[in-house]
Amino acid sequence: MPTPLQDLETIQRARATVLNRARWPVGYHLVVAAMGGGLVAAMALPDPLPSMAASLVAIGSVLLANWSRSRLGFFVNGWRWGRTLWVSMITLAVLLGGVTLSILRQRLDLPDWTPFAAGAVVFVCVFFTGRLWERVYRAELASAA
């Protein structure tokens, strides 16, 4: 039977392994950003295109999670408790702000291009918050290892 010290060593080795694997390529972050920006821009399109875009984002999210499992051997939920949660909250606020602006565009009498500009802003923000999330996650793993 392993001792508590051996159990802790096993946990530390597992964390070190995850830390070495927890590197997502730039392309991963670009795809996530494109899904967010595309969703915001799609809100300006006629029905049923916004619903179809939301469905594509949902399917894309599942495909990205499966890709992460196959490439890294695990998937990390962005809505986990820990040091990354504040980054996820910022990302959500930016995305919801963009979607809200796109949906309310006509009511606010904004130009037709507003949702596409908002989509571009969301794209950039989601890309950089995704990269930031990864750095915060890796720092959390490193400090616990």
Image (cartoon, rainbow, N blue to C red):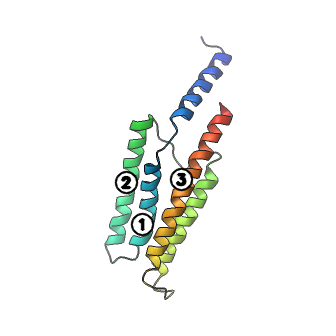
Query: Which residue was labeled with disc 3?
Result: 130
- The residue that appears at 45% across and 36% down in the rendered structure is 72
Residue that label 2 marks = 60
Q: Residues within 10 Å of mark 3 (few under 14, many from 20)?
A: many
Amino acid at pointer 2: Gly
The quarter of the displayed image where residue 94 is located: bottom right
Residue 6 locus on image (x, y percent): 64, 16
Q: Is residue 16 above or below residue 83?
A: above
For marks 1 and 3, give the one nearer the viewer.
Answer: 3
Q: Which residue is drawn at 41% across and 37% down?
A: 71
Task: Identify the residue at image location x=58%, y=65%.
Answer: 93
Query: What kind of residue is marked 3?
Result: Gly
Pointer 1 residue: 39
- Front-lying residue, 73 or 23: 23
The mark nearer the N terminus, 2 or 1, is 1
Q: Which residue is located at x 65 percent, y 40 percent?
A: 140
- Say what secondary structure mark 1 lies in: helix
Give the percent coordinates (x, y) of residue 15: 59, 30
User: Where is residue 22 shown, x and y percent of the image?
Assistant: 52, 38
Above or below 116: residue 141: above
- Mark 2, secondary structure of its residue: helix
Q: Mark 2 vs mark 3: which is more N-terminal?
A: 2
> At numbered mark 3, what does the secondary structure look like: helix, strand or loop?
helix
**Left or right of 4 in this view: 70:** left
Query: Which corner quadrant holds the N terminus?
Result: top right
Dot 1: within a 10 Å radius of its alpha carbon, few (fewer than 14), some, or many (20 or more) residues?
many
Q: Which of 108 and 117 is in front in this view?
A: 117
Mark 1 / mark 3, whichever is N-terminal: 1
Labelled disc at residue 101: none
